[in-house]
Amino acid sequence: MAKPHITFHESQPAKAQGLLAWLHIDLPLMIALLLLVGIGLAILFSAGDKEMVLLQKQLIRLGFGFAVMVVLAQIHPDNFRRWSPWLYGLGILFLVSVILFGELGKGAQRWLDLGFIRFQPSEMFKLTLPMLIAWYLAEQRLPPSPSRLIAAALFTVLPVILIAKQPDLGTALLVGSGGAFALFLAGISWRLIAVGGILMAGMGPVAWYLMHDYQRQRVLTFLNPESDPLGTGYHIIQSKIAIGSGGISGKGWLNGTQSHLEFLPERHTDFIFAVISEEFGLVGVVALLMLYLFIILRGLYIASQAQDTFGRILAGALSLIFFVYLFVNAGMVTGLLPVVGVPLPLISYGGTSLVTILASFGILMSIQTHKKLLPT
Amino acid sequence: MPQSSLKDYLHESQLFLGRAIVSGTLVILALMVLVGRLFFLQIENHEHFTTLSQDNRVKLEPLPPTRGLIFDRNGAILAQNLPAYSLEIIPEKTKNLTETIEQISEIISITEDDIQRFHRLRKQRKRFDSIPIRVRLQEDEVARIAVHRHRFPGVDVNATLLRDYPQGLQTAHLLGYVGRINEKELQRIDTSNYSGTDFIGKNGVEKSYESLLHGDVGLQQVEVNAKGRVLRVLENQPPQPGNNLQLFLDMRLQSIALEALGEYNGAVVAIDVETGGVLTMVSKPGYNPNLFVEGISSRDYRALEDSPDNPLFNRAIRGQYPPGSTVKPFIGLAGLEYDVVGFYQETYCPGYYQLPGKDHKYRDWKKWGHGKVDMATGIIESCDVYYYELARTLGIDRLYEFLTGFGFGIPSRVDLDGELSGLMPSREWKQSKRREPWYPGETLIVGIGQGYFLATPLQLASATATLANRGHRIRPRVVATIEGPDGEKRDSPLIEDVLHQLDPEHWNQVIDAMTQVVEGQRGTARSIYTSNYRIAGKTGTAQVFSIKQDEEYDEETVAKRKRDHALFVAFAPVESPKIAIAVVVENGGHGGSVAAPIARKVMDRYLVDTPPAN
C-alpha cells in the first residue's frame, strides 16, 4: 500500500511540472478548465453580440476565480477540515442576516452587503456544506451510525430551507444535492437511499404548497410550455427552436439567428447552452459535454485517490455538484427539466457561481496535491 | 490499533471507490439522456425547428403596386396618384385613445367627421393596424406633428399615394372612384394580391377595370429581430404597377356637354361611329369623387343620397327614359324593311288617331294636325299619327324584333359596370311581368317611343351610331388602349355585330329624312343648322307625366319636375359619320329647342375645333 505513495514523488517530471507541483496545481484538471473557459469566452463573444465590455468583465471574474482557486490549492486539506464547523456556522449566521437585512434583487433577497463586499452567502454553502458533512462523518467509522446520519441530514436541511426562503430554488437545489452526495459517498445503505427517494417524492405536494407563485408558474410552464408562448413559456420554446435548428453541425459561430436576432432570452447567462447548440450543432455540444465529463471524472478520480475520508467525501461531493450544475442547466435549456436559475458552469456570464466553482476546483487540487506517506 | 486503522482505511476506501464508480456511471448515464434529448431536438426534429426559426426571423412584407393612370384620348390626365401625408394611429399602442385624439386636435385640426371615420374604419380593421385620423395633411401640419410626436406613442405620419381625379365631377360617373376595401369586397378579391392595398375601384372605370388598374403586389422578405424591427432586406420582388388606360373620352367634349346642359339635369352620350368609342359620357348633376377616396363623411354622403337631383345616379347608363320620337326613324326603317309601307306613301293626320271601332283618341303633339304626311314628313315634323298608323300595321312582334336589333331593350355590354337594359316591350314580356295580354293601343304608343318603352342615353347613342353605320353595330367601349407596365400598348377589342342586311336605299331614305330634321324648313331641329358639316338628327319629347284625354298641356303650369324630358339623337357628318350623340335633358320640354343645341355644341367641338396637340 505504501508503494504508490513513494512513486508519487518520484513520478513528478522535473522543471515544468516542478512549478505546477510547487503551486499545487493538477495539470489535467487545469488544462481541461482552461479549455472550457476559453470555449466559454468564445461563445460569450457570440452570445453577447460581440460586446467587448461583457468579455472584459467576464475575464476579470475569471482571473479572480482562478486566483481564488490557486490560493485554496495551497491550503492543506487538514485546515479545511478544522475550519469546516466554523465556516458552516458563519454561513448560517450570514443566511439569517440576509433574511433580516438583505438586499432585494429581482424579487428575491439574496445579497448581503458587508460594507466592503457584496456577496451571496448561499453560494459558500456549495463548499462549506460538503466540507461539514465530510468532517462530521469522517470523525467516526464509515458507514455512519443512524444518529450521525440524522444529524448530517439536519445539517443539510437547515441551510437548504434558509436559501429556499430567499427564494433561490437553484442554489437550494445545488446546496441540497451537495449534502446528499456527501452522504451517498459516505456509504449510507442502499435501503436508506431508497427510503430517502420515496420521502423526496412524497415531499412533492408539500414543496408545491411552499412554493412561490413564480416557481409554481415555472413548473406549470415546464409541463406545457406552449400554454403560455408569450409569457413564461417563451424562454423554453425559443430555446428549443435554437437548439433544434442547430442540427448536426450548427449554423456556425456568430451565425445563430435565434440569439443574434434576440429571440432567445437570457442568451448570455442561463440560456447560453442553447447558443452553443444553435451555432455548433450536435457535434459541438457533444464535444463540450465530453470535456465536462472529463472534468467530472477527473474530480471523482482525485476523490478516489484522496488520502483520507474527509478528502474523499469532499472531493467527490464537489465534483458531483459540478455535474448537477451542468445537468440542471442543460436539462432546463433543452426542456427536460423545469426552468431553474442555474448557470452553465464556467461558461454562463455572471460572477458569483463562477468564483464558487473555481474555488471548489482549488479545494480538489489541494486534496490531490497535499499527500504524505502513511505510517506503516 | 494501527492494524485496525489500516483495516478501517481499506474498508472505507473500498466502500468509497464503489460509490464513486456508481456516481461516475450515473453521471455518464445522465449525460447520455441529455445527448438523447439533443438528438431528438437536433436530428429528429431539426426540420421542424428550422422552419420555426425561419418563421421567427423572416417576415414577408407586401409592397403594394402603383395603380394605373387614366388618360383621355388627348392625353389629359383623368386619374392619378398623388403623394399625401396622413396622420395614423395604432389604437393598441396609445395610452388613452380619446385623450390622444383630443391632444392631437390641439395641434392640428381634427373634425368630428374625421373622428367618426376613424372609429368606422377601426371596426373594419385588424388589431394593431394603423388607422388614419387625418388625411391630406398640409406641410405645416406635418411639421407641427413632427415637433410633438414624442408625446404620442402609436401616432405616426405616413406618406401614401392617394387617388386623385383632377377633373372632379366632370368625370365622376364615368370613372367612378376608389375607396377603402370593405368586407364584402374582401371576400371577392385575391387577398394575397391585395395584401398591401387599401383601396379598390368602387364603380365606373375604376371598378370595371380594377384587375388591370391594380397591378401585382410585390414582396419583400425582411429579416426582423424579436422586437419586429427590420434589420435587412433578404429578397425583394418589386411590385408590378397597374396598367395605364387611355379612354376614347375627349375631355373637351365632356366639359362642353356639361356646360351646355346649363341648369338642367340630364345625360349626354357621344360615340365615335367608326370604333364604338365613348367620346363623351356626361351625367348631370355630378359629385366630387375625391371626397370618396379617403372615406366621405356621413353628413356629406347623406346630402348626396337625399338630394332630389340624385347626383350619385349615373343617368348615362342607368337612366331609363321613354325614347319618345327619337325612335321614329327606326320604326320608319322597319316599315320599309317589312314592306308594309312605301317611303312616299301618304297618310292623313287630323291631329289624332283612333283605332277602328274605339272612341279613344291618340293625340298628335300638333293639335290641329299635320295634314297629308309621308314617312319623311313624319320624321321631319315628327308627326305622331303617321307612326301610330305605321306601328299598328307592323304590330308589336315585328317592332320588337326590329328594334332589339338596334339594341333597344338589351344591354349594350359597354365596358362599364352597372349598365341597365332599358325596356323593349313585347307580348311575352307583358304576359310574364304584368300577367296581361298585349293590347293593340299599346302598340301605337310604342310607335312614338312612349308607354312601356324605355331606353338609356347610351342605348340611344349606340342605336344612332348603328343607323349612321348602316347596320354595323359596334359595341360601345370606354377604354381605347391598355398600356402595360412594360410600356406595351394593346387596343381594346372592337366587337361588331352585323345587323341583317337591309336595302341600302332604305337607309338612304331614312337618313335623308333625318338630315331634313336639321336642314328642312319645317324640321324640328332646324335651329341647329350649320354650314360646316351636315347633321342627321331626330328630336324627341318624353312624357314624364301622363295627360288625361282632352286636357290641355301647359308648360307654364306644370311643375318643373313633371315637365317633359327633351331628347335629341344625331350623327354627323352625314356623308361619312364620325360622331353619334344622344342628349336627354330632364324636364327640358322640347327636344328641338333644348336638347338639340347641346348636341350641336358637342359636335362642333369634335368636328370643327382642332384638337389640342398631344
Image (spheres, helix red, strand yellow):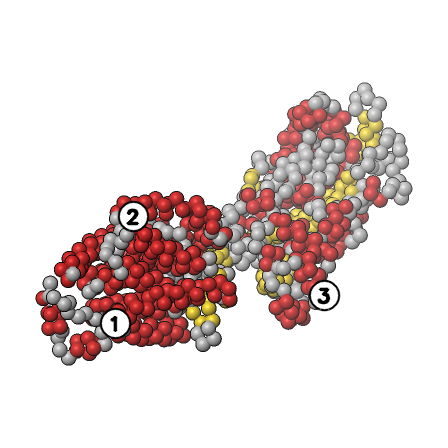
Is B498 on the left or on the right of B133, as rendered? left
> Marks 1 and 3: which is nearer the front?
1
- In this rendering, does residue B538 appear at all? yes
Q: Mark 1 points at which residue?
A: A76
Distance, label 1 to label 2, CA atoms, is 32 Å
> In this figure, which residue is indicated by the disc labeled 2?
A193
Camera-nearest label, 2 or 3: 2
Residue shown at 40% from the left, 59% from the top: A159
| Helix, strand or loop at mark 1 | loop
Could you tell which of marks 1 and 2 lies nearer the N-terminus?
1
Q: Residue B363 or B132: which is nearer the viewer?
A: B132
Kindly identify the residue that appears in the image at 17 percent across and 78 percent down. Answer: A18
Query: In terms of secondary structure, where does tag 2 sit?
Result: helix
Q: Which chain carries label 3?
A: B
Task: Examine the rendered structure and indicate whether residue B538 appears above or below residue A41.
Answer: above
Label 3 crowd (10 A; few <14 / some 14-19 / many >=20): few
The location of residue A331, given as percent across then percent down, is: 34, 54
Q: Which residue is drawn at 69% across and 30% down?
A: B425
Q: In this view, does A37 lie to the left or right of B520?
A: left
Label drawn at residue B106 = 3
